[in-house]
Image (cartoon, helix red, strand yellow):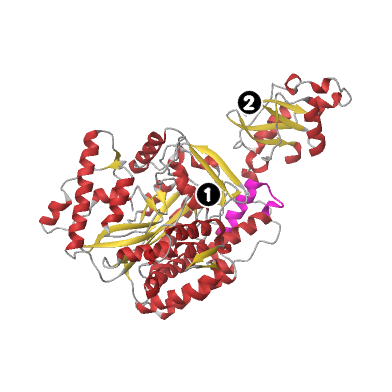
Amino acid sequence: MGELDVTRIKTKKDQSNYIHHLLNDIKALDIMIDKGMIEEQPLRIGAEQEVFLVNNQFLPENKSLELLKDINSSNFTTEISRYNIEINLDVLDLKESCFSALHNQLDTLLEKAKKFAANKQIKIILTGILPSLSINNVGDNSMTAVKRYSALNEVVKKTRKHGFNIHIKGVDELNILFNSAMLEGCNNSFQSHLQLSPKTFVDDYNWAQAIAGPILSICTNSPLLFGKELWSETRIALFTQSFDMRINSYLLNEKQSRVSFGNQWQTGSITNIFKDNISRFRSVLTTDFTKSSVDLLKENKIPKLRALHLHNGTVYPWNRVCYGTLNGKPNLRIENRYIPSGPTTTDEIANMVFWIGIMLGKPDKYRNIHEKWDFKDVKTNFFNAARYGMATQFYWDGKHVSSHELILNELLPMAYEGLQKYGVSLADTEYYLRIIKNRVQKRNASEWTVRNYRYLLKSHKRFEAMQILTAKMYEKQEAGEPVHKWAMLNESYDSTYRNYWIVKHIMSSDILTVNKNDTIELVLSVMTWKNIHHMPVLNSKDELIGLVSWKDLEIYLNDIENQKNSISEIMQTDIKTIDEYATVLEAKEIMKAHQISCLPVVKGKKLVGLLTHNDF
């Protein structure tokens, strides 16, 4: 959980005071490591569950603060968007039936949340990116009213000085300009924590990096964003770009993004990992401090390292090192941030068990892996897994191997041995690892989502398909079966939300347009080829300035001379338009009142869709 009572660093005094405490925290951590004060045993696990809130139409619902007030539990907290909340699970010793115990607590807390959510007509969905999200949901008006988030947003805007160019290319392509940290709210994860011994921590961290790609490949659950089919785990690309504070320039940018897999193996002491982050990324937030951590150590008190904790909370490696205290003792853990939320709690715990099992089952031949493997191979594996999921071919231990082969033949046996070595019950081990095995042999969540989204698009417009897919995902989550047992959608689905339909549900978004300087001859040809009856006219800034219909053009079919004229000479300029979030009824009334058969859909002056009689 990030500290919420924070402010943006605004003055030199703020900066100086914060840096003083931050460097003191590093000194204190070095002292605790040197004196053997960091806890070695027992190993422990923990997790954070992020969820989406939706309404009865399965669209995002901005009621997180109201819901959290009703729940009134320290296990629940806010996220940056008002349609997300986070559930923090208890820390458990790694032993016996710890994973099923964690699973039971997660289900209990979710049921508690669902009980209060139902009173507000809210449903809770576990997924990496909500399929029914639209660009309208990621404005600053959806940001949670908490200091931390507004401060972060201020920093992002001030540092960037211009918008984020979000460009993700998969089967489809997403290319938008955005100027807010709110895109972070599109991403939900199931963050797993593993406390480890300080004696082997750096080598264990490198191993966590090495195995990240293969583990991610079986866990992917975020293939869609704004109706676009992108990466198997689109969160990886989206979060990296949406929180990138680097300024674009004509120079080659060698700086590392705050959301990163890293550029090299870690070596030396544990504090070198924190020191590297402090060296690369400037502090952006501060809070109130009382006493330095070094002074607290001198008084035989264990410091919380608040300044370091705050800095660490604004740097987002996919495997993050975290310092904490429990029962008055300091500890170090790895936070796995790349595994997405959902699709069921059973799937999530299975992912966690698989990751921790491999962490604990590392064979001797993979010790000091930084001396044997090229880091670029490991990083390539990670991003290939994010793009292709279970279709990935990895470069592993000097040879190419498929994801299926690597998981079934090496990683699952390794996980099994690691869990048994540390006393995890045979029942937990076999139950959760069998889910991973079945998923490899059948399908994972991103595969289910993509196949069914494509199926729905055959008979539904994109926005409605996004909505139906979310509803079906919710139904299957509530049934509780892990994703490898989910049946495919194979029938016609009539929307039950038609009373709430908006223009976005039925408009066409794949629109052919013409430039005001295009000739009548060209426009006639395009309309004939494509069998269309209306074409919007744009200017050089891609702004809608006119509309031309077949009726406007048909008199020129045999007028060869005048076909050379510009379309701007005959286009209609007094055109009626509508917003994509207006109701379908409003659109009908406008078209009827003005006796028109085509209604451009705009956002500002930009064309986003077209509505004709055929769409109704």
Q: Earlier in the sequence, mark 1 or mark 2?
A: 1
- Residue at screen point 61% across, 36% down: 580
In the picture of the structure, the residue carrying the numbered disc 1 is: 55
Q: Main secondary structure of the magenta part?
A: helix
| 1 vs 2, front mark | 2
Q: Does residue 62 appear in this view?
A: no
Q: Quadrant of residue 97?
A: bottom left
Q: CA distance from mark 1 to mark 2?
A: 40 Å
534 relative to 245 in the view: left or right? right
Residue on which disc 2 sits = 540
Residue 476 drawn in magenta: no
As helix, strand or loop, the secondary structure at mark 2 comes to: loop
Residue 465 painted magenta: yes
Residue drawn where x is 33% and y is 45% of the image: 281
Task: Kindly identify the amino acid type of the residue bearing the numbered disc 1.
Answer: Asn
Vertical arrangement, residue 308 with respect to residue 594, above or below: below
Residue 560 sits above or below residue 461 on the image: above
Residue ID at (28%, 55%) = 272
Q: Secondary structure at mark 1?
A: loop
* Coordinates of residue 10 in the picture (x, y in percent): 28, 34
Tell me where residue 519 appears, x and y as whole percent.
77, 25
